Image (tube, rainbow, N blue to C red):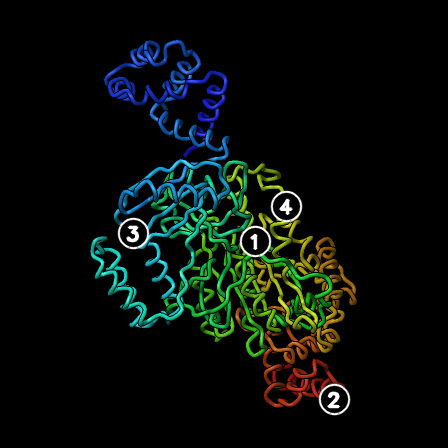
Amino acid sequence: MSDSIQRSAAVLYQMEEETPGLKESAQALVSDTMLWPALNGTGATREEKEELIRTAPMLAGKEQLTAFVLLLLEQGTLDSLPAILRELRQLELAAQGGAVCVVTCARQPDEATLEDLRRAVCRLRGLERVVLQIKIDPAILGGFRLEVQGVVYDRSVRGRLERLAQGLKGDFDADSEELEGLVEGLKSKIQGFEVEDGSDMGSLVQNLKTRIQDFQSVGEVQEIGRILSVGDGIAQIQGLDRAVYGELVEFETGVQGMVMDLSRNSVGCVLLGQEAGLREGSIVTRTGRPADVPVGEAMLGRVVDALGQPLDGMGPIRTTETRPIEHEASGVISREPVNAPLQTGILAIDAMIPIGRGQRELLIGDRQTGKTAIAVDTILNQKGEDVICIYVAIGQKASSVARVRDTLQKHGAMDYSIIVSATASDPAPLQYIAPYAGAAMGEYFMSQGKDVLIVYDDLSKHAVAYRALSLLLKRSPGREAYPGDVFYLHSRLLERACRLTQEYGGGSMTAIPIIETQAGDVSAYIPTNVISITDGQIYLETDLFFAGQRPAVNVGLSVSRVGGAAQTRAIKRTAGTMRIDLARFRELEIFTQFSSDLDQATQKTLDHGKHLLELLKQPLYQPMSVSRQAVLLYIGTNGLLDDVPVEQVREFASGFADRIELEHRELALEVQRTGNLSAVAIETIRADLENYKKEKLTVA
């Protein structure tokens, strides 16, 4: 039923109170077998229809009703008058403490049965009077089905059999051939059953009794609503008076939806699937549970959609638990400071912008600057570190998600990873819930005391999807047309990342959100929002990327506010002056553009900076261990590479690190285990470096 019908019925109700008898006159007009078809047909002109209305005998002396009918004719909605009268009847009954109850039976009930039903409905719903509308439907096989005030009481034989079949699916293994045969047989019985054939029903029930013990028939009472309008992934629903925000609802086509707007007369719902087959008047049923996703160890190694359903063609995912996608973040008492490092394996980041377990570190930069590559490298580096990784793709191309999966598969990282995919072709509601679904999966492992890394790629597209939903739900737009709660959209998501105290399990969830900027504008609305929420940001610069500095990290604009406390001692000790050295290099580099005469100290500083930049260049998908990073940082920051030609720095440093790992394996293992670079290790590195230089560097 549309809003216009409800409004028209309300107007007619007020007119009826002022001038009694209008309803009967309108009903007489609709019931006139000659006049009503003429008014709705195409044989008469508009002027002729107006004349018929003005001269209609049942409208004589009722100017208000005549004007009302003429208005419907002018709007082209005269054929909705019967629906308006039905809605008027509902309003009258509601005003008298009553309601209309639709009773569906397999055969016509007698008067005694109808009276029993009236009393039962009045008792169930707390009504003073009930008007029964009888519908005969042999397909329900027997029993009855009541629909009153948006609630359905299903006591039909067909309904019980369908619930029994559904219960079997939940109690048996999904691969059981016995179950499949039983359910298919049950379905065929339902389709071909005749009401008069009592023997078939008896044999069916006896067959089920031998297979099922202690089955309880549930779900006989359902709260339903009907679609007022549907389109663009949004459904407006009449009814569902007890629906709550974030609740899952189910449409008659099997598609699920989530309640996102509660207004006085309707419920706004986003569709978590395709809207094909849905139309005005379609039935929507409450589920009574919040939107949730399956969680558990079985999710590892899988590619799933935002609802947790598999997309990789590897069969169903067998999990026994679910978690709501929206969950309150951990409180202050249950958190502890970030004190354990999460190594990315990327030298520039681990040295100058360290990330700790439980931290939220933003990756920000223009498109095609290597943001996803850094996130994937970080996931690859968690191999053997007992860290569960979740990659959430929001609004990405399907080919990009496939490429990430292939990379993780190739390097053996899918064994401890989950990919949640809501691609650009998926509806906006699925893109909206995807990061929350990923966070719910991560919280499950965090509650088990495990460490989790979750990547949101990217939250810019997430904000765009939420903006589309909000505008379709007619929420007031604000800056850049985003709704007023767009800050809360991301803050409640990122606040779920934390490190728990031992009393609460000791797990952690580290979040790496990604934001795409436009032309390097970090002061735009969404970037500034997320920067203020996170514990630091890694800024990737386009100019550095195209200059060959990859990863293209801008050290001056990048910062980690809490990760320094979690940095390993070896890295902290060896990288202590690197940020200052690079800042001095950048400053002098700009200054020397206007001067050609440089003193020796300035030239030395510039050469040292160039060597450091070369050292920080790193190939894709080759994360470094802590021991390797410590060796490279020590020889780089102490100027031990300054006599190596700049173009040979990367090859020379990589070869030297390989030699240390090969010839001094115990030293590398000690640094990896303790996170400390001892005096013995430093002496060994210096001595070996001198020998390596003699072997590799040719004297001009």
Residue nearer the viewer, 255 or 155: 155
| Residue 103 visible within the image | yes
Q: Residue at x 57, y 39 (%)?
A: 481
Q: Residue at x 40, y 39 (%)?
A: 101
Q: Nearer the viewer, mark 2 or mark 1?
A: 1
Is 147 placed left or right of 517 in the picture?
A: left
CA gap, disc 4 and disc 1: 14 Å
- Which labelled disc corresponds to residue 459? 1
Q: Earlier in the sequence, mark 4 or mark 1?
A: 1
Q: Residue at x 38, y 39 (%)?
A: 281
Q: Amino acid at mark 4?
A: Ala
Q: Earlier in the sequence, mark 2 or mark 1?
A: 1
Residue 625 point in image, percent of width and height: 61, 78
- Residue 143 to residue 484: above or below: below
CA gap, disc 1 and disc 3: 53 Å
- Which labelled disc corresponds to residue 524? 4
* Residue at the spot of label 3: 142
Check whether the beta carbons of the residues at disc 2 and disc 1 lie within 8 A of each other.
no
Classify 10 Å Cα crowding around label 3: few (below 14), some (14-19), many (20 and above): many
